[in-house]
Image (cartoon, helix red, strand yellow):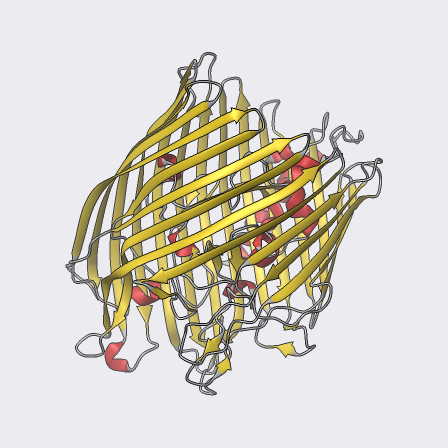
Amino acid sequence: MSASSSRLLSGLALLACAPLAHAADAADSGDSARTLDAITVVAEREPGNFDLDRGEIELTQASDLGELLSNESGVAVGGGSPVAQKVYVRGFEDTLLNVTIDGAQEPAELYHHQTRVQIEPEFIKSIELDAGAGAATAGAGALTGAMRVRTRDAFDLLRPGQDAGVLIKAQAGINGENSAKGVLAGYGRLSDRLGLLATYVYQDGGDYDDGHGDRVKPTAYRHERAQAKLSGLFDAHQFDVSAEQLEDTGTYYERPHMTNFTGRYVLSDHRMRRATYAYEHRFDPDGDALNLRFNAYRTRSDYQNRRNTTGLLYGWGEQTSTGFDLRNTSARDALSLTYGVDYRSDRLHALQQATPRPFWGRTEQTATVFGAYAQGDWQASPQWKLSAGLRWDDYRHKGESGISAGARNDQARLSPNLSLTWTPVESLSLRAAYSEAFRGVTIREAFFSSLYTHRGDLDGERADNLEIGIAWERDGFFARATAFRQHIDDYISAVYDGASAWGYWENVGQAEVDGYEAEIGQRWERMGWSLGVWNSDNKLDGRPLNDADLGLGTRIGRTWTARFDWQPASARADYAIRARLVEDERNSIAAGAPDKPGYAVVDVMANWNLLGDDRLKLGAAVNNLFDRFYYDHGTYGYQAGTRSYIGFPSPGRELSLSLTYRF
């Protein structure tokens, strides 16, 4: 669906909600005050596993992935425009991570020079990250963990006693050519048990300035997002049905996360879109035997790059994914058991004309995965908790036409997990965990799939993850640490040949990471602080990863994070500081390459409820307060051939201001 169609649908949905707003109760919100706990990572989760809620997202004034996730333990986000930002978890790229939005899987990777995770922070309710291969419920192919994004519904926005409302927000970013963002939402009750939310977001950003005050080109972008969501609450039954569409466009070089370091690159018009349709049904009657959840979804992701000068196609791809997940949780005494089945079917059409003409290619590929799983938790005694799970996944991949036509890769495998937690005293817990995950041969990146050939001889990728952790919490003070070691055997990558074919998909070896994460902090009713550190040592067949390992990961320096939050007694404002210090990291991309230089970045932010409730809110944030010049270690940096940095430096100081009005 085109962007103009998206705008039309959003406008019609908002107009449908608008008449309801006249009936809205204008009473002050009884729950407008936000407690400090709502913006901190909950202490019960391991370091590197986080749960961001709406309060934290609003406080940071986040407009892209970097602003949203960079200050979280274990996470790095590359620089450049939002289209170019890559997410790394424990040094591994997000291509190895299971990502779901409202229960809908988002498996598509379109182009290795741009972002894979395409989300809009404005109406996110929460983001959960479980790093590392883990529970059987994480889904098929969760080699390095799972990220679950949930969006808001009408009942999240309605104040007590309110039947309908409208939200209007304007936001501006002051840096370089500046940026502007507009948000419009209409929401209301269709009945006592039905709620409808319709939203539209438009953002336009110009080229930004780095910490030296130099204009960084090309980094301008345009972003649009529209969503409609119907929610129902019927005693033991609840459901959500939603349709979400995003579009990101801009003019960049053929490789959006790189500069024109050769002098030969041509500016190209880039477009990336995602449309997700999701349904979730929950049935939780009285009793402990049934707690059912059913998710069904269809996601379509596509990209297109055309040379700006001639309009000739550089690359195009479209992937659709359709699937479901059905699970039940039963509890009895000290035992809780979740079990279910999931299924996903993917289809890719892709075309590239980036190479010399003899190697131009197209492909159509299909893949399916069926899984069955069970995960149990047993509180054997007040001191001991055992968790164990098992999932079985059956992958089937086929080249339908074009490059890889006729190639088949089918494989099935069991993946177990086991963890034991010991609590010798109430405040102290120790945990050891081992887990496996399996990702069979499935559809890889769209661009490379029309360039590199399947021969039908691949093994699936197998991950094992070992973790030990310790946590202490008492009287608001907490301390916790985790050490981990993970291997990914038979990692699949594209290997250049240059003879009869450009290259082939091959099992290239074993990827591994060794690392640790730790955090200490303290929380009071209206104030809190924390200090954390994380480090990961990523390798492929014994050699350190570097920026050229696109799709797998890179090396990131040891990272220290700090945060401070304060809410005055009036509960009409929130203030926060976020700081991140990244140490130098040896650059293994080539002999004699300079180290990745370290950097320190400080962000400050605040929200004010101007009318004492959430009807009128002013937000302000200063990112990179001291205007530091730096390259994020998740950015493609040094190029040995030209002996220069070819990625984009991060933005310098930026002032972000927003005003939100709800009525």
Q: Is residue 219 left or right of residue 406?
A: right
Closer to the camera, 114 or 593?
A: 593
Q: In the image as oriented, which residue stretches furthest toward the bottom? A: 263
Looking at the image, residue 615 lies above or below residue 86? above
Instruction: Please tell me which residue is depicted at 42% across the width and 28% down the height of the picture.
Output: 293
Q: Is residue 574 left or right of residue 276?
A: right
Closer to the camera, 548 or 57?
A: 548
Residue 127 visible from this viewpoint: no
How many numbered marks are there?
Answer: 0
Instruction: Please tell me which residue is depicted at 20% across the width and 58% down the height of the picture.
Output: 399
What is the quadrant of residue 170 in the picture?
bottom right
Task: Tell me residue 239's x, y (percent).
Answer: 49, 29
What is the quadrant of residue 14 in the picture?
top right
Q: Quadrant of the C terminus?
A: top right
Looking at the image, residue 402 lies above or below residue 146? below
Task: Tell me residue 233's x, y (percent).
Answer: 55, 24
Residue 580 visible from this viewpoint: yes
Task: Tell me residue 19's x, y (percent).
Answer: 69, 36
What is the quadrant of residue 328 in the picture?
top left
Task: Tell me residue 569's x, y (percent).
Answer: 84, 35
Closer to the camera, 79 or 193?
A: 79
